[in-house]
């Protein structure tokens, strides 16, 4: 299916997928393949494929306000290839002078050379996949770095002049005590990040962890334990001047992830690379996952046209994850505003958990832990009278 760029709103956001990592973690369901530093020709071939796709997709871009280079582990491609990628992006897209440009990295493949190359290329935000500072938890998660490498990565970030950087952590691990969670949080805070992403461990389909759980090799934290960890995490970070602005994300004032806010606000975005997904309302299209297929054949896996019903569901699912919630005007573009407000006010099971006005609907932060249930309740009440 051919999409006319004149019929869709230009995207302000660009995601580039780098599907390489040193080792595949057992919980991860993102597309990636394990490689080592000697795979230089594969990296070059992949960059060539990215260049080809970028030339096809740039007509759908406006002035970019965010760029996110994710994976996989982008830091495994090395400093030179990162600079080549950034030159490719800058040569094909117009960037806002204040654009947020993020690259993901893992501690074991992030060094001073990569940090300096990132800074020289115009990247201004680093996201480090720490996940934990506890050696046993790191091994359980299949991570190949240790806490010392996290500290060294943070030092490289600071020495390269970065002010804005994120640390990823995973909590709600089997038998993880609150004290263990607080230890990880405090170790992360000691490195002075401007942003923390704290995710509960989720068992994804078709991952080694799914097999382990089916074989009862470990027992997941129960709902009560997860709720306690969540509440303590939010309380602890809020006490350290971090704003809990999205269910799993915390930031110092002014350092919220602008790229991810674009997703949560249901804005258009372009995705480049193997398995990457693009969204240009009402179209969503996804690239093939297999890297060989992506590089050597038709890249596109499928194109989907979202109905107003689907768009409304996704608007609520994404937007209500944040403290800013969803503007009523956005809902009104997909559903009768009068009927929406009427149905919400009749839904007595959630009224005490949300704030709603003529301009916006927001889940109260103290109920973020049960946000999925609240969103499902709201969506289910809108089933009738919607488009067909």
Image: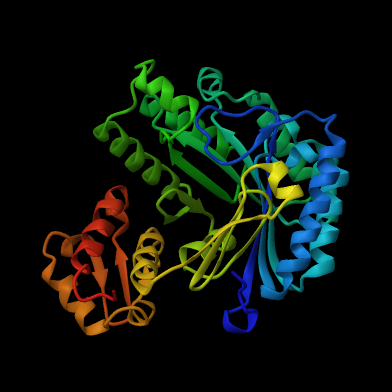
- Seen from the viewer's position, the closer of residues 270 and 186 is 270
Please provide percent x and percent y for residue 174: 38, 23
Res. 256 image quadrant: bottom right
Please provide percent x and percent y for residue 344: 19, 71
Q: How many marks?
A: 0
Q: Is residue 62 visible?
A: no
Q: Residue at x 61, y 38 (%)?
A: 129
- Seen from the viewer's position, the closer of residues 283 and 111 is 283
Q: Is residue 225 visible?
A: yes
Q: Name the image colouring.
A: rainbow
- Seen from the viewer's position, the closer of residues 314 and 185 is 314
Res. 19 image quadrant: top right
212 left or right, relative to 43: left
Res. 75 image quadrant: top right
Q: Residue at x 83, y 52 (%)?
A: 48
Image height of 1 relative to 353, above or below: below
Q: Residue at x 39, y 15 (%)?
A: 217
Q: Residue at x 85, y 67 (%)?
A: 91
80 left or right, relative to 254: right
Q: Quadrant of the N terminus?
A: bottom right
Image height of 18 relative to 221, above or below: below
275 left or right, relative to 80: left
229 left or right, relative to 159: left
Q: Quadrant of the C terminus?
A: bottom left
Please provide percent x and percent y for residue 244: 43, 54
Please provide percent x and percent y for residue 92: 81, 69
């Amino acid at each position: 299916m051919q999409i006319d760029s004149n019929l869709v709103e230009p995207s302000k956001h660009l995601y580039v997928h780098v599907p390489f990592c040193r080792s595949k973690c057992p919980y991860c369901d993102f597309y990636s393949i394990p490689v080592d530093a000697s795979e230089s020709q594969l990296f070059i071939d992949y960059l060539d494929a990215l260049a080809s796709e970028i030339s096809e997709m740039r007509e759908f871009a406006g002035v970019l306000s965010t760029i996110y280079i994710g994976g996989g582990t982008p830091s495994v491609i090395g400093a030179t290839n990162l600079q080549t990628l950034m030159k490719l992006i800058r040569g094909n897209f117009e960037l806002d002078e204040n654009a947020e440009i993020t690259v993901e990295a893992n501690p074991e493949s992030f060094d001073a050379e990569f940090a300096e190359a990132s800074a020289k290329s115009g990247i201004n935000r680093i996201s480090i996949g720490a996940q934990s500072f506890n050696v046993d938890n790191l091994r359980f998660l299949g991570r190949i770095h240790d806490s010392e490498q996290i500290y060294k990565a943070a030092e490289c970030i600071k020495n390269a002049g970065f002010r804005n950087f994120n640390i990823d952590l995973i909590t709600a691990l089997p038998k993880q005590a609150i004290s263990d969670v607080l230890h990880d949080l405090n170790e992360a805070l000691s490195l002075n990040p401007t942003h923390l992403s704290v995710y509960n461990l989720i068992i994804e389909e078709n991952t080694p962890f799914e097999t382990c759980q089916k074989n009862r090799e470990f027992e997941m934290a129960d709902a009560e334990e997860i709720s306690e960890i969540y509440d303590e995490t939010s309380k602890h970070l809020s006490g350290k001047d971090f704003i809990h602005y999205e269910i799993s994300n915390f930031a110092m004032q002014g350092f919220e992830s602008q790229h991810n806010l674009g997703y949560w606000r249901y804005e258009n975005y372009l995705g480049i690379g193997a398995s990457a997904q693009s969204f240009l309302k009402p179209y969503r299209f996804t690239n093939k996952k297999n890297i060989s297929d992506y590089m050597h054949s038709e890249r596109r896996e499928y194109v989907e046209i979202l109905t107003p019903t689907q768009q409304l569901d996704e608007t609520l699912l994404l937007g209500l994850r944040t403290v800013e919630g969803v503007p009523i005007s956005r809902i009104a573009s997909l559903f009768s505003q009068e009927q929406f407000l009427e149905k919400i006010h009749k839904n007595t099971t959630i009224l005490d958990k949300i704030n709603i006005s003529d301009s916006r609907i927001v889940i109260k932060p103290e109920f973020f832990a049960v946000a999925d249930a609240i969103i499902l309740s709201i969506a289910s009440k809108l089933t009738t009278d919607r488009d067909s």
